[in-house]
Amino acid sequence: MSKNKQNILIVFFDKYKLLIAFILLVIFQIWIASGRLYIYHFVDEDHHIVNAYMMTQGKSIYQDLSSNHQPLPFIFSYFLQKFLPINNLLNLIKFHHLFILMYGIGWYFILVRKFKYKAIAFGFLFEAIKYLFFGNLFLAETFAVYPLVYLGFLFFHNNLKINFDNIFDKFIFSVSFILIAFNLAPLWPLLFFIVLYLLIKIFIIDLKIYRTISKNSYAQSFALGTIGVFISFLISGLAEWNFGDQEIITIIWFTLGLNLANYFIDNEGNEQGESV
């Protein structure tokens, strides 16, 4: 190869090296995803797709369909099922996962445009490990991770000072917050303290009932047992998220409710009974 051609190649790669890196990232992303389009083994994804199907049949989420999830996964799935030629289960899974793939490529374009090689490095790392954490599935967390990365890079890119180069950056900044809010509802710090208060309050109520209820009665024995159940619930919760398990948390609500019922029955007719 002549020296002139070598110089042309050097100039070409130097000028388009970021574009080449982005193309390589997309190729890497597609290569990994191509053999995993039909992976389908997580209940939240079922929940989103099935409820979205019911929406195509005229049902309304949160009114006709019960869910504790944020709305955007249902909305995205609804439009996919409404307007794409999905005629079997395999196509249903494939189109949802292809949507996630295209969603990721779009966000990598935005990230690389703004943060260049930092975004490239993140992309290769995330694509290599995301399948270990269900990052390819049709989940709220999947939709929120790219906007979160965008905001994280934005905050730390200029030492916690946000600088917008143009109106497009302002638009993406706003969209990122919207996507996070309507996927994860970023109230977790507040919700953490609310749940902590709730747990403490439940324990105080159970303990107060045990101390104030008639001695040597069935109700007092039940109150003591309720305290034991609640403490066991908290201890086992150190290793497993019991508070989000419907079967487990139902036991807590049931024992708390029965404990309160025993307390009010025991104090029936006693106007001096303390309030819990």
Image: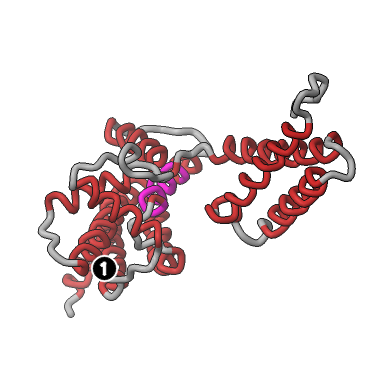
Say whether residue 231 is magenta: no
The x, y position of residue 100, in whole percent, is 28, 57
Classed neighbour count for the residue bearing mark 1: other residues with Cα under 10 Å, few (<14), some (14–19), many (≥20): some
* Rendered view: 107 above or below 179: below
Q: Quadrant of the N terminus?
A: bottom left
The x, y position of residue 31, in whole percent, is 27, 72
The x, y position of residue 125, in whole percent, is 43, 64
* Rendered view: 128 above or below 224: below
Q: Main secondary structure of the magenta part?
A: helix
Question: Which residue is at 25% across, 64% downward?
Answer: 93
- Residue range corresponding to the magenta coloring: 141-152
Q: Quadrant of residue 235?
A: bottom right
Q: Secondary structure at mark 1?
A: helix
Of the pair 244 and 39, the residue shown nearer to us? 244
Instruction: Name the side, left or right, on which 265 lies relative to 49.
Output: right
* Rendered view: 85 above or below 111: below
Q: Quadrant of residue 124?
A: bottom left
Name the residue that disc number 1 marks: 30
The x, y position of residue 139, in whole percent, is 37, 54
Instruction: Name the side, left or right, on which 86 lies relative to 131.
Output: left
> Is there any visible trace of residue 42 in the rendered image?
yes
Given the image, on which type of amino acid does mark 1 rest? Ile
Colour convention of the picture: secondary structure
As drawn, the residue found furthest toward the bottom would be 1
Number of marks = 1
Of the pair 170 and 97, the residue shown nearer to us? 97
Question: Which residue is at 77% across, 53% downward?
Answer: 228
Instruction: Name the side, left or right, on which 243 lies relative to 171.
Output: right
As drawn, the residue found furthest toward the top would be 271
Question: Which residue is at 61% across, 41% downward?
Answer: 192
As drawn, the residue found furthest toward the right would be 215
